[in-house]
Amino acid sequence: MSQTVAITSAQHFTQVLNSSRIVVTDFYADWCGPCKAVAPVYEQLSSQLSRPGSITFTKVNTDMQKDIAQSYNITAMPTFLIFKAGRETKRIRGADPKALDAAVKQLAQEAATADEGGIAVESSASSGATWLGAAAPRNYPDITEQVDQLGLDFLNLDGEKGDKKTPFQPSKPSALADKKTVAGGPRNDWIESDTDEQLMLFIPFMCTLKLHSVHITSLPSGDSDSSDDETPMRPKLLKFYTNRSHNLGFDEADDMPATQEIEIKPSDWDPKTGTAKVELRFVKFQNITSVVIFVESGDGEGEKTRIDRLRVFGETGEKRKMGQLEKIGDEKGE
């Protein structure tokens, strides 16, 4: 029985992209000879590698779903798109079974890694991959590379743990990589508050952004012999301030209205990756050059707050203009 999902509408496609870490899509047409020639290879890969919530194979009939084809600038059939965390990361034009087979089998390996804790997506800043603790929001990529790390300023930071750049590292947190130890990995792979639970994080950007959301990974842990107040906490109450030229003092923040105030609930944390999605009021976070995140309180009875990773999602410029669908039925290999 075929595992391939036939897309019936744009809304259906969005639902699939949001429900599976990796999505492979075959854009085809019934009249397209090369589409029919490569279809058995695609179906075989689908039957072998489909995994619910992890890898999903889909088909989009470009004549039936013209709006989807146009939105992804499909100009030849078949075209295969690969999405990771809802974001297009690879495009294969034409009936190229070898390229399709190689690309999809590489995905299977990445999916296995993702099941162990997190999602690996391609980074435009390097040839490596960036670990994400949760799927990127639809149409809003990871733009953490735009953080101006030289301008970072964190207040009440424990100097014995990681430095200001630590939360923006692209790697998987060591607490997930080393499951044999509860804390996991080196002590400098996360940041903690120092004298109390509060943190003040000044984060400038290298260009003007539109911020959609922030993902926070926090993997607090403690030894079994440690008391509860020695175990660091996850952030709970956050206050966001935008377009500041410098960091805020704690007293200053208390007297200033926040752009947005958010409380992270225990149910918001992913049990596998320790990541919470903090969605912002997008209309209030346009033309952003910097953001201050005030961690006002943590969730628990501890005295310190811990953050392992921070990821920023949004837009760094105008969206790409989508082209018109061009039917190509007589080209060989396309």
Image: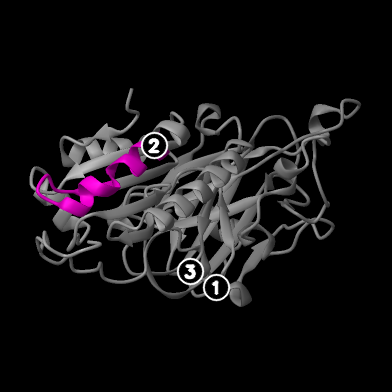
**Where does the magenta region start and end?**
26-46
**Which residue matches tag 2?**
44
Please indicate whether residue 82 sits to the left or right of residue 322 in the image.
Answer: right
Please indicate whether residue 48 sits to the left or right of residue 178 in the image.
Answer: left
Residue at 61% across / 61% down in the picture?
168
Where residue 172 sits in the image (x, y, percent)? 66, 50
Q: Earlier in the sequence, mark 1 or mark 2?
A: 2
Where residue 189 sits in the image (x, y, percent)? 75, 54
Q: Specify few, some or many for label 2: CA neighbours under 10 Å numbering under 14, 14-19, or 20 or more.
A: some
Quadrant (top left, top right, bottom left, bottom right) of the C terminus = bottom left
Label 1 and label 3: CA atoms lie apart by 28 Å
Q: Nearer the viewer, mark 3 or mark 2?
A: 2
Q: Specify few, some or many for label 3: CA neighbours under 10 Å numbering under 14, 14-19, or 20 or more.
A: few
**Which residue matches tag 1?**
246
Residue at 82% across / 33% down in the picture?
222
SS class of the residue under badge 1? Answer: loop
Q: Is residue 219 magenta?
A: no
Q: Specify few, some or many for label 1: CA neighbours under 10 Å numbering under 14, 14-19, or 20 or more.
A: some
Where residue 111 sits in the image (x, y, percent)? 54, 41
Mark 1 and mark 3 in contact? Answer it, CB < 8 Å. no
Mark 1 and mark 2 in contact? Answer it, CB < 8 Å. no
User: Which label number is shown at residue 124?
Assistant: 3
Label 1 and label 2: CA atoms lie apart by 56 Å
Label 3 and label 2: CA atoms lie apart by 31 Å
- From this view, report whether residue 97 is shown above or below residue 228: below
Query: Which residue occupies the foreground of this view, 155 or 35?
Result: 35
User: For residue 50, which quarter of the picture?
Assistant: top left
- Can residue 133 be seen here? no
Q: Amino acid at mark 2?
A: Gln
- From this view, report whether residue 51 is shown above or below residue 10: above
